[in-house]
Amino acid sequence: MTKLIPLNIEGKKMVQLAQLTIDQANDLRSWLPKESIQNVSFQGMELNECILFETYDYWFKSHHVLTRPYETILDF
């Protein structure tokens, strides 16, 4: 999985859940408290389902790095 690049919105680094695959977005939604998902205005547009990049970064490191399948010598 490729890590998202954050948007700088009003001095805060944010990511939009729509940038993720459906499975990843659903997984992240189920992990997050509902109040952490926000709608924000950016350059005259309303962006739905945004979260702080640091929250996404923690989830990315703790969930996706640890759940990545491990290869063993028998896999070669």
Image: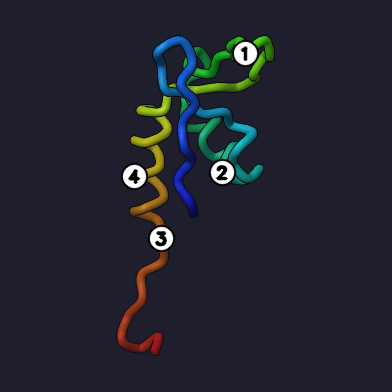
For disc 4, the marked residue is: 61
Q: Earlier in the sequence, mark 3 or mark 1?
A: 1
**Residue drawn where x is 67% and y is 13% of the image:** 46
Cβ atoms under marks 1 and 4 closer than 8 Å: no
What is the CA distance from the residue labelled 3 to the residue labelled 1?
36 Å
How far across and how far down the image is residue 34, in percent?
A: 53, 17
Q: Please state which of residues 70 and 7 is positioned toward the viewer in this rendering.
A: 7
Q: Earlier in the sequence, mark 3 or mark 4?
A: 4
Q: Earlier in the sequence, mark 1 or mark 2?
A: 2
Q: SS of the residue at dot 2?
A: helix
What is the CA distance from the residue labelled 2 to the residue labelled 3?
13 Å
Q: Nearer the viewer, mark 3 or mark 1?
A: 1
Question: Tag 4: Cα neighbours inside 10 Å, few (<14), some, or many (≥20)?
Answer: few
Q: Nearer the viewer, mark 1 or mark 4?
A: 1
Is residue 21 toward the left or the right of residue 35 in the image?
A: right
Residue type marked 3 = Arg
Q: SS of the residue at dot 3?
A: loop
Above or below: residue 50 compared with residue 6: above
Question: Tag 3: Cα neighbours inside 10 Å, few (<14), some, or many (≥20)?
Answer: few
Above or below: residue 50 compared with residue 64: above
What is the CA distance from the residue labelled 1 to the residue labelled 4?
30 Å
What is the CA distance from the residue labelled 3 to the residue labelled 4?
11 Å
Is residue 16 toward the left or the right of residue 67 in the image?
A: right
For disc 1, the marked residue is: 43
For disc 3, the marked residue is: 68
Cβ atoms under marks 2 and 4 closer than 8 Å: no
Is residue 71 toward the left or the right of residue 38 in the image?
A: left
Residue type marked 4 = Lys
What is the CA distance from the residue labelled 1 to the residue labelled 2?
26 Å
For disc 2, the marked residue is: 24
